Amino acid sequence: MVMHFLLLLLFAGSLVAADEEPFIGVNIGTDLSDMPHPTQTVALLKAQQIRHIRLYNADQGMLTALSKSGIQVAISVPNEELLAIGQSNSTALNWVSRNVLAYYPSTNITSICVGSEVLTTLPNAAKLLINALKYIHSALVASKLDSKIKVSTPLPSTIILDSFPPSQAFFNTSMNQVLIPMLDFLQSTQSYLMLNIYPYFDYMESNGFIPLDYALFKPLPPNKESIDSNTLLHYSNVFDAVVDAAYFAMSYLNYTNIPVIVTETGWPSKGSSNEPDATLDNANTYNSNLIKHVLNKTGTPKNPGIAVSTYIYELYNEDTKPGALSEKNWGLFDSNGVPVYVLQLTGSGAVLANDTNGETYCVAKDGADPKMLQAGIDWACGPGKVDCSPLLQGQPCYDPDNVVAHANYAFDAYYHQMGKSTKACDFNDMATISTSNPSK
Ligand SMILES: *[C@@H]1O[C@H](CO)[C@@H](O)[C@H](O)[C@H]1NC(C)=O
Ligand SMILES: *[C@@H]1O[C@H](CO)[C@@H](O)[C@H](O)[C@H]1NC(C)=O
Ligand SMILES: *[C@@H]1O[C@H](CO)[C@@H](O)[C@H](O)[C@H]1NC(C)=O
Ligand SMILES: *[C@@H]1O[C@H](CO)[C@@H](O)[C@H](O)[C@H]1NC(C)=O
Ligand SMILES: *[C@@H]1O[C@H](CO)[C@@H](O)[C@H](O)[C@H]1NC(C)=O
Ligand SMILES: *[C@@H]1O[C@H](CO)[C@@H](O)[C@H](O)[C@H]1NC(C)=O
């Protein structure tokens, strides 16, 4: 066992420099009907102490606004531009000159994502993807920026098959013709494997096989943890299991020193009736636990202590995204920069500072049962000792005369009376903390 541990440490040393600090970044999608101006977005990033972002393009407005912000930026070659770049090194050179050299170093571009989930969304472009990676990298070499800016391509975790137990995971073999030259490229350029991980979809598609708590990083009783019978490693969350599956899938092809960076992960805060687990609570739990987990330098069971830096999907709710209701609700903020929920980050350091003047309110949860809300009001106005006289007919808080508005009043009054303790905003799970004032 001691031997085993030593080997792990040695292996760990070869994977990433020991002083590598993990970071939490945020993806910025732009499918919003009222997309904030780049200067507003950058102001939000600064206020929230978000130091790492990923853009899905190389937007001129954003790259200009990010100048001298100290924020580290991953930019992207959109899939639409991949074909041209993969066919011509001069187009690649041109792209780098227009989208990197024009802004660097005052805008701190630290990586280029070449395409997005190309192997699954544009399988015919897979061959060109390798050329595109190489051409973009060569253009950086020509400008002596290859040691400062990494080049890679975000992969969906669905190309890893048999991902539990992680030790048996392997990449879809029909993609080996692309994956092997890609891994060669990542290894020889000291880049990282970019992986999109969605425990939400893994959970939804598992038909009850994956417990919700396991997807949400909630503590599990030891007998509920998943154990990899080959390695005897214990897995307490889906995220770690998928990251380790990627490490094992790479080592199965004899690549053992390419670090993993998670380019997308998150949880939707709202969905339609057939998406019952897309809730504020679950989104808050997932992202809060994720941030704590990543920044705690826990690493994964296979590579403890090895940084798995992660970009949360995503900064804004994207109201014009097509598809299910949940698709529009992955954001941490609305387009006004108001948090969709207040992350619970006690003790995890300075990222996502949940500002908005620190003002918070206790409000009725969306869709809460009116009978339960009434019971909560009765409790707050009775044993809870809230002065509910303003709710009486003819008094200032009587209108609107509905149970949600009255619950918002009574719950918030109780919450403030109790010094805004999180515990005071529960009401049989009918209440939640919000940063927007319900009486406005
Ligand atoms: C582009 O490719 C051509 C043909 O392979 C080569 O001659 C040329 O030097 C390359 N240009 C750059 C900028 O890498
Ligand atoms: C960009 O970020 C890197 C990585 O943290 C840092 O070492 C470098 O000093 C930054 N460059 C600029 C120009 O701010
Ligand atoms: C593996 O990839 C091929 C396409 O390259 C796809 O048709 C097939 O469905 C994938 N297999 C699995 C099990 O996902
Ligand atoms: C990995 O390396 C081992 C030992 O050198 C070799 O037997 C095996 O064929 C290699 N696998 C691949 C996929 O290259
Ligand atoms: C942080 O890491 C320590 C040990 O490295 C561990 O005991 C603790 O449970 C971790 N906390 C979280 C929130 O993961
Ligand atoms: C979040 O906001 C609360 C209330 O203002 C504050 O006490 C807490 O420190 C903030 N968290 C972080 C990580 O800044």
Image (cartoon, rainbow, N blue to C red):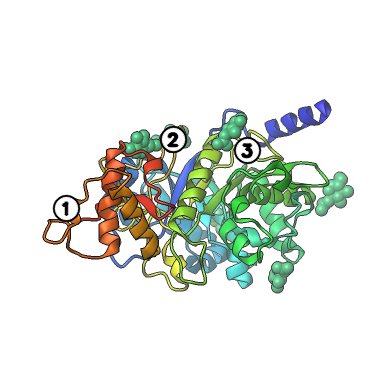
Q: Is mark 3 within 8 Å of ligand 5?
A: no
**Number of numbered tags placed on the structure image:** 3
Residue 432 is left or right of residue 249, and the answer is: left
User: As drawn, is 109 to the left or to the right of 15?
Assistant: left
Q: What is the crowding at mark 1: few (fewer than 14 residues within 10 Å), some, or many (at least 20)?
A: some
Q: Residue at x 75, y 67 (%)?
A: 174
Q: Amino acid at mark 2?
A: Thr
Q: Is residue 16 above or below residue 223?
A: above
Q: Residue 212 at what x, y percent from top left? A: 60, 56
Of mark 3 and mark 2, the one earlier in the sequence is 3
Say above or below: 295 vs 411.
above
Q: Residue at x 57, y 28 (%)?
A: 19
Question: Which of the pair 405/322 is nearer the observer?
Answer: 405
Q: Residues within 10 Å of mark 3 (few under 14, many from 20)?
A: many
Please state which of residues 45 and 268 is positioned toward the viewer in this rendering: 268
Asked if disc 3 and disc 1 are in contact, CB closer than 8 Å, the reply is: no
CA gap, disc 1 to disc 2? Answer: 35 Å
Image coordinates for residue 127, horizontal then vertical, percent: 65, 66
Ligand 2 quadrant in view: top left
Mark 2 residue's CB less than 8 Å from ligand 6: yes
Task: Please give the residue where the numbered disc 1 appears in the rendered image.
Answer: 390
Q: Residues within 10 Å of mark 2 (few under 14, many from 20)?
A: few
Which image quadrant: the N terminus? top right
Tell me the quarter of the image containing the C terminus.
bottom left
The residue tagged with tag 2: helix, strand or loop?
loop
- In the picture provided, is 284 more to the left or to the right than 163? left
In the image, what residue occupies the spot 16% across and 53% down?
A: 390
Q: CA distance from mark 3 to mark 2?
A: 20 Å
The circle drawn on residue 346 is 2
Q: Is residue 176 visible?
A: yes
Mark closer to the chain start, 3 or 1: 3
Give residue 159's position: percent from left, percent from top: 67, 62
